[in-house]
Image (cartoon, helix red, strand yellow):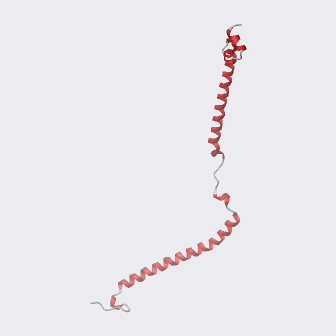
Amino acid sequence: MTRPAALASMGCRFVTMLSPSRGPERLVRAGQWTVAVLFAWFLIQVGASLIADLPLLSRAPQPAQFRQASALQTVQNQIDPLQTQRQGLEVQLGELTRRRGLAQENLSREPRASRPGGRPGP
């Protein structure tokens, strides 16, 4: 018996893997590992591109999606008269402010002695 055959018969697998007749088997296994690694890389890239595109597939929620139309209309009906009342009050405030300015102007023109409760000047 030759030495590699003797070692193989004793259960040494290392020697049988190095024998020249196992060369194509080793190439096939290396090729299988290469294909597995490339396929894993491909799956990782596809997953990454899918995750990157997820924000483009859906829209962000808008506040209008969460509003109830009937409740919104009820509140709007309550707000409209109040806004009209506010505008009227702003007009009155403007008129009163204008009158106050005229009254202050007239008061500053009058001599101090002619004012009620005023004292004659020195």
Instruction: Name the spot of residue 44 as percent of width and height, x first.
Output: 64, 35
Q: Is residue 111 above or below residue 54?
A: below
Q: Quadrant of residue 101?
A: bottom left
- The residue at the point 66 percent across, 25 percent down is 33
Q: State which quarter of the image contains the N terminus.
A: top right
Q: Which residue extends farthest right?
A: 9
Q: Quadrant of residue 52?
A: top right
Along the horizontal axis of the image, is 35 left or right of 120?
Answer: right
- The residue at the point 40 percent across, 82 percent down is 104
- The residue at the point 64 percent across, 58 percent down is 63
Q: Is residue 50 above or below residue 110?
A: above
Q: Which residue extends farthest front?
A: 10
**Nearer to the camera, 43 or 20:** 20
Q: Is residue 83 above or below residue 68?
A: below
- The residue at the point 66 percent across, 17 percent down is 14
**Nearer to the camera, 56 or 103:** 56
Instruction: Name the spot of residue 29 as percent of width and height, x first.
Output: 68, 21
Q: Quadrant of residue 120?
A: bottom left
**Nearer to the camera, 90 or 63:** 63
Q: State which quarter of the image contains the C terminus.
A: bottom left
Along the horizontal axis of the image, is 7 left or right of 112?
Answer: right
Instruction: Name the spot of residue 107 as percent of width and height, x first.
Output: 38, 85
Instruction: Name the spot of residue 56 as percent of width and height, x first.
Output: 63, 45
